[in-house]
Amino acid sequence: MAATPPPSPDTQPPTAPTTAELIERLAGSFGLYYGDFTLAAATAGLTASQAKALSVLRGSPAPMRALATTLACDASNITGIVDRLEKRELVRREPGATDRRVKNVVLTELGEQTIDTVRARMHSTLSGLDTLDDTERTALYALLGRVFPRGTDGSESTR
Amino acid sequence: MAATPPPSPDTQPPTAPTTAELIERLAGSFGLYYGDFTLAAATAGLTASQAKALSVLRGSPAPMRALATTLACDASNITGIVDRLEKRELVRREPGATDRRVKNVVLTELGEQTIDTVRARMHSTLSGLDTLDDTERTALYALLGRVFPRGTDGSESTR
DNA sequence: TATTGTTATACTCTATAACTATA
DNA sequence: TATAGTTATAGAGTATAACAATA
């Protein structure tokens, strides 16, 4: 596909899109993003959930509980997800410093390399972002913030 | 484009966001969207996949095969998904007109009502969209088209 | 031969409930 | 009592492989 000459092969309404049209486009975009992410993860032998977990941990280690909150799933699921990641040496369970009930999940070297690979692939897949100028970047960033006025980083997404 | 006073509680970089920051925001937004959609579907007693299938069929009936392509999953999965929807009277399997191997999946009245309920809920959840003016709507629509220059409606997203 | 839909199988994700060991 | 993590369980999604009916 070309860089992005004829701007877009998209169905661009002659007038401003309606809310319904915007929702449809959001749904389509999200479907594509999810497919891209799933594929990028699969390339590294990971499921989407596993890649998401590693991505969260890339920021900093976290207790099982916090991981469940961030991933917006029940705590019981984390056990299995971390089990599988640990079996592959991508993460380690470390004892909590003060509270002995807590187990901190930490990325291993391999885990860091692996998630970085996934991110790199996403970066190249979303190459369209590199064609945006500063004004467009700022606009997209702000508009998404308007439409999803929550953590955006996933923090409060847990519902 | 300062049409965005300080209403947003967002972390807005003083300069244009980098590609990495944009990807992070996209990931966060998509996570929120997915959570919203899953919740909206659950309210109607549906899983996200089931709701997505109904949403596709809301446009028009489709053969099992086409449904698999649109939902970007293996054909064998559709059997189970449609089985469960059919058991709840949300869809019907109708024999293909010409090719007797084909089975067209059609929404029932109840199926239409159900998916419309989910859509209505999404519409109210994404109320932020209603606060966008025409310029912003057009910009968001076009920018997403730039970043996800494919079907956007899911058509080519498959694979 | 190729395609449509199905079945069988296996794995992962998901939530619920009950359990343990801490606090 | 309350919390962190685990286990057991069940349902759903997913892919692979093999199959019957049809093209």
Image (spheres, coloured by chain):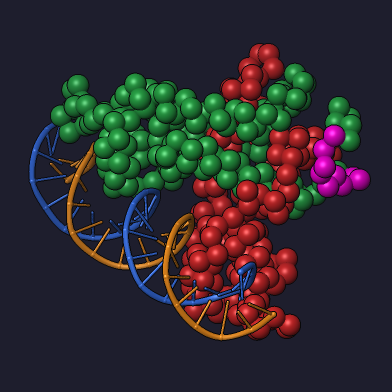
Chain colours: A red, B green, C orange, D blue
Left or right? Give the position of A57 relative to B104.
Answer: right
Q: Residue at x 65, y 19 (%)?
A: A17
Instruction: Name the quadrant of the C terminus of chain B.
Output: top left
Residue reaching furthest top? A15
User: Could you say which quadrant of the image residue A121 lies in?
Assistant: bottom right
Q: Residue at x 43, y 43 (%)?
A: B47
Q: Can residue B64 be seen in this view?
A: no
- A127 or B81, nearer to the observer: B81
Classified by dominant secondary structure, the portion drawn in magenta counts as loop
User: Is A105 within the magenta?
Assistant: no
| Residue B113 point in image, percent of width and height | 41, 23
Q: Which residue is drawn at 62% across and 28% down?
A: B124
| Residue B74 point in image, percent of width and height | 34, 47
| Residue A85 point in image, percent of width and height | 53, 73
User: Could you say which quadrant of the image residue A64 lies in?
Assistant: bottom right
- A106 or A122, nearer to the observer: A106
Left or right? Give the position of B93 relative to A127.
Answer: left
Give, as a single range, the part of the protein colored magenta.
B7-15
Q: Residue at x 77, y 21 (%)?
A: B133
Relative to A63, does residue B36 appear above or below in the rendering? Answer: above
Relative to A72, does residue B110 appear above or below in the rendering? Answer: above
| Residue A16 point in image, percent of width and height | 69, 17
